[in-house]
Image: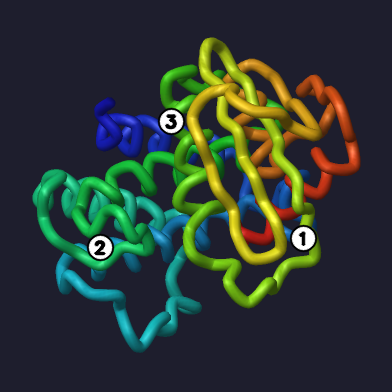
Amino acid sequence: MDFLEHVRAESARLGEVARTGLDASVPSCPGWTVDDVVRHVAQVYVHKVEALKRGTRPDPWPPDFSDLVSLEWYDEARTAIVDALAAAGTTTPTWTFDPRDSTSAFWHRRMAHETVVHRIDVEQAHDVVSPIDPALALDGIDEILYPTLAGPWWEEGDTEYPMDAAVRLTAADRSWTVSADATSVDVRQGAAGTAAATISAEPAQLYLWLWGRVGEDVIDIGGDRAVARAFRGRVSEAAQ
């Protein structure tokens, strides 16, 4: 998948919609306006440009960006991240938060998903939501399940949703079985074994539900709904 092309296209759309009004409230991010989303994404882009340049996590961070004009900064940051990803390619060693991937390929993928989710935010704010590429959505389900959810974050049992159950997700012809307890999360491809709850939807809708951008009305839940909701809570903790 050409993640860099998705970064280009999704970031262009985000900027286009943001220009129709920075003061609009973002339904999925209570307390945020489109301006907050634009500034957040610009800062994420600049952070990753620095990470790719240094090969390490930028520290100290962040600098003071308060005097920058939102859309001008966003445009500069958008150009910078596209150029940095293109220059790095997909094999450059760098800092990431994925224990399995310490190459620039990680940031190609991560920036594509960062951008599409926040593109949806600004579109929802202006009620002009456009489709998500189903293949990108399926990859995004993979990505939020690992490393976002199932990385090594839970050893201390620091969760409000200890669960101790398995959940099965299904979209298109793909399935994932996620087993979680207070101190671990395990993700397996496929539908083997039993699950306390099942969750199915079209790829884009499941992707957006996992990211908290749509509600339960767009998914089908089977089995124990309390487990499904605890699972969604666990994802929200990991995605903060």
Three-letter code for the amino acid on which mark 3 is drawn: Asp
Give above or below for 72 relative to 110: below
- Percent x, y of residue 115: 45, 43
- The residue at the point 31 percent across, 36 percent down is 8
Q: Which mark is residue 139?
A: 3
| Label 2 CA crowd tier, 10 Å (few <14, some 14–19, many 20+) | many
- Distance from Cα at disc 2 to Cα at disc 1: 36 Å
Q: Which mark is residue 44?
A: none
* Residue nearest the viewer, comparing 146 with 210: 146
- Percent x, y of residue 59: 32, 85
* Residue nearest the viewer, comparing 212 with 27: 212
State if disc 3 and disc 1 touch (CB < 8 Å). no
Quadrant location of residue 58? bottom left
Q: Earlier in the sequence, mark 2 or mark 1?
A: 2
Quarter of the C terminus within the rendering: bottom right
Residue holding disc 1: 162
Q: Secondary structure at mark 2?
A: helix
* The furthest residue to the top: 173
